[in-house]
Image (cartoon, helix red, strand yellow):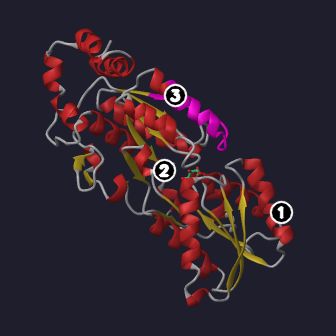
Amino acid sequence: MRKSSIRRTCAALAAVTSLALAATACGGTTKEDVKDEGAKAATAGKADPNAETKKGLTVGFLPKQVNNPYFTVADKGGEKALKELGSSYKEVGTSSGTDTAGQVSYVNTLTQQQVDAIAVSAQDPGALCTALKQAMKNDIKVVTYDSDTNPECRNAFISQASADDIGRTQVQQLAEQIGNKGEIAILSAAQTATNQNAWIEIMKDELKDPKYKDIKLVKVAYGDDDAQKSFQQTQGLLQEHPNLKGIISPTTVGIKAAAQYLSGSKYKGKVKLTGLGTPNDMRKYVKNGTVEAFELWDPAKLGELAARTAVALASGQITGKEGETFKAGAMGEYTIGKDGVIDLGKPTVFTADNVDQFDF
Ligand code: RAM
């Protein structure tokens, strides 16, 4: 059994049995214990930025949805980074973006398997809390990436960009395309998704600016990150609101499905569409005139940063407190912000001019 696993088993043992018995079963000092100084400091609430980066760890990735191309790219980034760091990667998850019970049971399984860290994208902010707290009690470090849970239910959140940057720019792009006038709608993912809901709140706030006084948000529809449902929701939006001038879809599954619908309809090029998409999904719709501009960050970098943060936490280099810094390999140094949030950077805007320069 790996030392870190022993430590967790001992913690679990101490929780269910008398402390003396656990101490006897787990006693003794080894070289590994000395190396573990950093991790111990972290458990005690102190980070040791000079602690050695541990090898041989296992980090379990639990995306919002497996077989969503966005998460395939993100998690591959995590896998690559873990390989470089001498640790192991595993991925588990549900194929539906609205299976919160499934996500909870995967967290419990990873805890039972005594992984060293979990990187999870939450389908629902609160639903995973109890399970994640249980994992942390068992000395498993928890990092959320892409979509957060509540701050007390994880050690750190790797945010793709600030919610402000993502939410406001999408409104600005669409407003420009429709000449600051007309009805607009949002096609989101799951109704509970922490990330999309945070961005939608910012979009609504941006729309309060008097310069958008002639723009009316008529509906927020939910396609659940399901291609067929998102396609049908787009069709429904146009039927219900024949004067619709534009749609924002802040989900890679949603924007692709909406583009597919618009591109085969009389609305192509007339009803504007923007949001968050991958260049590979959206290239053909930019080229055929359905979409002028959309944005995203590099999902592989998001997954890589999640993996590197998980390893830094498990190595005791950081604890997740505001102001702590750590080195994320070639990605450079990152500083932990308020509430344990680490921002990856700024999103990139893709148009016909640059879309061919990206391959993800
Ligand atoms: C979808 C998911 C994910 C989101 C991206 C933009 O793949 O909803 O959570 O970050 O879109």
Placement of 67 over or under 339, stated as above or below: above
Residue 121 rendering spot, x and y as whole percentages: 51, 44
Q: CA distance from mark 2 to mark 3?
A: 18 Å
Please tell me in which quadrant of the rendered image residue 230 appears: bottom right
What element does badge 1 sit on? helix
Q: In this rendering, does residue 152 appear at all?
A: yes
Q: Looking at the image, how many numbered discs can be counted on the residues?
A: 3
Q: Quadrant of residue 339?
A: bottom left
Q: Residue at x 65, y 36 (%)?
A: 95
Residue at 67% across / 39% down in the picture?
96
The one of 21 and 223 positioned closer to us in this rendering:
21
Residue 336 horizontal/vertical position (percent): 29, 54
Task: Give the residue pinned by disc 1.
Answer: 236
Task: Work out which residue is located at the far right of the displayed protein and give it.
Answer: 239
User: Sequence-wise, which precedes: disc 2 or disc 3?
Assistant: 3
Look at label 2 and name its amino acid: Asp
The residue at which mark 2 appears reads as: 148
Q: What residue span does the magenta drawing correspond to?
A: 90-109
- Of badges 1 and 3, the one in the foreground is 3
Describe residue 75's horizontal placement relative to residue 243 as left or right: left
Expressed as whole percent of the image width and height from the top left, the position of residue 99 reads: 66, 39
Indicate the secondary structure of the residue bearing disc 2.
Answer: loop
Q: Which residue is pictured at 77% across the width and 48% down the height? A: 228
Q: Which circle, 2 or 1, is nearer the viewer?
A: 2
Of mark 1 and mark 3, the one earlier in the sequence is 3
Kindly check if marks 1 and 3 are in contact, taking CB atoms under 8 A apart as contact. no
Q: Image check: 92 left or right of 346?
A: right
Looking at the picture, does residue 111 appear above or below residue 129? above
Identify which amino acid the numbered label 1 is placed on: Gly
x then y, percent, for residue 303: 43, 43
The residue beneath circle 3 is 108
Cβ of mark 2 under 8 A from ligand 1: no
